[in-house]
Amino acid sequence: MLYSVYAESTPNPEVMKFVANRMLVDKPIEINSSKDAQGITIAQELFKFPFIKTVYINNNFISIYKSNDINWEDIAMQLRIFITEFLNDNGIKNYTEHIEEKSLTEKKEKKNREFSSEEKNIISILDEYVAPAVEADGGAITLKSFANNIVTVELKGACNGCPSASVTLKNGIEALLKDKVNKEIVVVSE
């Protein structure tokens, strides 16, 4: 069965989500330059396009952050066709299977870090209530830290730099955590 890919807009006007009918990676990764793309062939090829700033790959989608001097209507079809042909020419594989990327190493260290019971509760709430919606929009959210009632989250993919992220953080995530954890919580992004 061949790959098929469709393009989907995100709340971030600079990011488009390209969704495949098969899994692409077994671990999410955000790539900010062609240098960082080493070992991830699809990202290496995408960074050859001069208008691509960031590539975020998770499960079965690729979120592409473009430069603001070009419109999606001028490049979305070109990118969709390119991604589809690239995937089909290279066969079914896991694009992050053999990489030792700094961000993946940091993520592994975070997973090995001992979280407090409050932090584990916050992570659980983010994973259950927030992560699915954020992923549907082509992004990701993770707990960076929790201290003195301040929850610091890290936004990736389409969420990073999204104009509506601050509203989502305050009206959505902060309200949810105030309701479920502590009324004094303040949410900020790094």
Image (cartoon, rainbow, N blue to C red):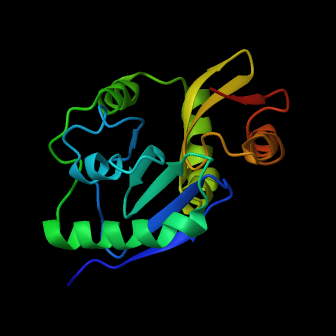
Whether 116 is drawn above or below 22: the answer is above
Instruction: Give percent across and percent down for residue 179.
Output: 81, 43
Location of the C terminus (image quadrant) = top right
Whether 58 is drawn above or below 34: the answer is below
Residue at 32% of width from left, 30% of height from top? Answer: 108
Q: Is residue 98 left or right of residue 55?
A: left
Whether 104 is drawn above or below 10: the answer is above
Q: Say whether residue 151 is visible.
A: yes
The residue closer to the viewer here, 121 or 154, is: 154
Q: Say whether residue 91 is visible.
A: no
Q: How many numbered callouts?
A: 0
The residue closer to the viewer here, 61 or 125, is: 61
Q: Is residue 110 left or right of residue 153?
A: left
Residue at 54% of width from left, 23% of height from top? Answer: 116
Whether 140 is drawn above or below 118: the answer is below
Location of the N terminus (image quadrant) = bottom left
Instruction: Give percent across and percent down for residue 143.
Output: 56, 32
Residue at 49% of width from left, 24% of height from top? Answer: 115
Residue at 31% of width from left, 49% of height from top? Answer: 43
Instruction: Give percent across and percent down for residue 152.
Output: 65, 26
User: Which of the 4 image quadrants contains residue 148?
Assistant: top right
Instruction: Give percent across and percent down for residue 31.
Output: 38, 39
